[in-house]
Amino acid sequence: MPRALWLPDTLRAHGLTVHETPGWQNRGSSTLNPSGVVCHHTASAAGSDHPALGTVINGRPDLNGPLCNVLLARNGDCYIIAAGTANHAGTGGWRGLSGNSSVLGIEAENNGVGEPWPAHQIDAYVRLCAAMCDGGGFTPDTVCYHREWAPTRKPDPAGPGIPSGDEWRRRVAEALTQGDAMTADDRAYVDAHDLKILIELKKTEVRLTERMKFKSRKTRAEIAALKADISALEAKVG
Ligand SMILES: [Zn+2]
């Protein structure tokens, strides 16, 4: 997987609001081959929504951009920054992973020195991690905090509202399950669709039964198959 071009669609599928920054597809090197996620905070001043946007795209004097794959704004919106490897994790590792090319990076807007994390931002953060597991094909076990990746160097993410790493992974796993589950609307749509198919099958059954008058062995086999389909659909539609 040289570039994570699936990011916007997968994040949207997990109910997130996504903004694609111009050029994200070609930003970062194509060495990216992610098997995990490292979670960060931006240490930006509190008050505005996504003040670190320019920095995470362009980098800092001491570190070339991009500095993450996705920036999570204070309002919970996701900004797609890079489909390639970003400079975010640095020296360290987590459960056998090491190097920036092995992990996707999320920078979340928070000052990291006591600013409370709003519930809607935490909810989006967890779903963003779940979406990355989904799109990248790895499990929540390899989602970690930067302070778990580099315990002696890094404190992030920090602040009121950030649980333990284990609790974070539990929530990501939960979100991943919910992401797979159909909503009530989806269920209703599928049931309505099944009902239409059932009506068509019953019409076909009537036609074939007419043909049974000719007692063809092929027709009897077709009717038997059809009755099995009808029973299965009737059980499903209830
Ligand atoms: Zn960090």
Image (cartoon, rainbow, N blue to C red):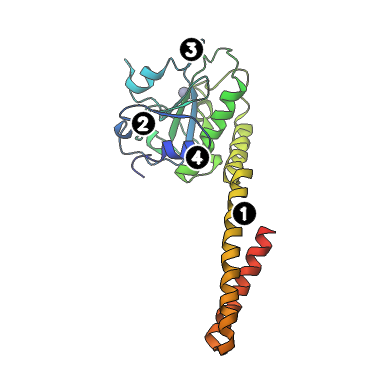
| Circle number at residue 48 | 3
Q: Residue at x 62, y 18 (%)?
A: 160
Tell which circle, 3 or 4, labels the residue nearer the N-terminal end: 4
| Residue under pointer 1 | 191
Residue type for callout 2: Ala
Left or right of 172: which side holds 72? left
Q: Position of residue 237 (x, y in %)?
A: 66, 58
Q: Nearer the viewer, mark 2 or mark 3?
A: 3
| Residue under pointer 4 | 13
Q: Are marks 3 and 1 in contact (CB under 8 Å)?
A: no
Q: Quadrant of the C terminus?
A: bottom right
Q: Residue at x 32, y 20 (%)?
A: 58
Q: Is mark 2 within 8 Å of ligand 1?
A: no
Q: CA distance from mark 4 to mark 1?
A: 21 Å
Q: Residue at x 50, y 28 (%)?
A: 39
Residue type for callout 3: Ser
Can residue 6 be seen in this snapshot?
A: yes
Tell which circle, 1 or 2, labels the residue nearer the N-terminal end: 2
Tell which circle, 4 or 1, labels the residue nearer the N-terminal end: 4
Q: Residues within 10 Å of mark 1 (few under 14, many from 20)?
A: some
Residue 183 found in image quarter: top right
| Residue under pointer 2 | 82
